[in-house]
Amino acid sequence: MCRSIKTLRPPYAEQVTESDVHAAALQYVRKISGFRAPAAHNTEAFQEAVDEIERATAKLLGALQVRGR
């Protein structure tokens, strides 16, 4: 679906920054909403979605156990 989103877990990414997580969340929301930048009346909903996906991504990455590490 979002081919430009990079895998953010080891061994594919050794160091993942908050910026990496934000960029992935933003790309995801852009893809599913169809907006590169939302209109003013959609900005709050767009940003809330990005924030929620950032939190969910950080939670997921923190909980994953990678075998052989």
Image (tube, helix red, strand yellow):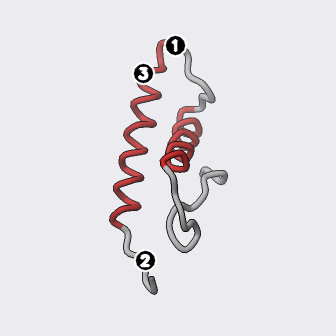
Q: Earlier in the sequence, mark 2 or mark 3?
A: 3
Q: Which residue is mark 1?
A: 40
Q: Position of residue 2 (x, y in %)?
A: 61, 50
Q: Position of residue 30 (x, y in %)?
A: 57, 35
Would you say 8 lies left or right of 64 here? right
Nearer to us in this view, 18 or 26:
18
Nearer to us in this view, 38 or 65:
65
Disc 1 crowd, CA 10 A, few/some/many (<14, 14-19, 20+): few
Callout 2, which amino acid?
Answer: Val
Secondary element at tag 3? helix
Q: Position of residue 62 (x, y in %)?
A: 36, 62
Where is 19 relative to 37, above or below?
below
Callout 3, which amino acid?
Answer: Glu
Between circles 2 and 1, the one closer to the viewer is 2
Q: Between marks 2 and 3, how big is the CA–CA gap?
A: 36 Å
Q: Which residue is mark 2?
A: 66
Callout 1, which amino acid?
Answer: Ala
Residue at 50% of width from left, 49% of height from top?
21
Q: Between marks 2 and 1, how big is the CA–CA gap?
A: 41 Å
Where is 22 relative to 11, above or below?
above
Residue at 39% of width from left, 30% of height from top?
48
Between circles 2 and 3, the one closer to the viewer is 2
Residue at 41% of width from left, 52% of height from top?
57
Q: Which residue is mark 3?
A: 44
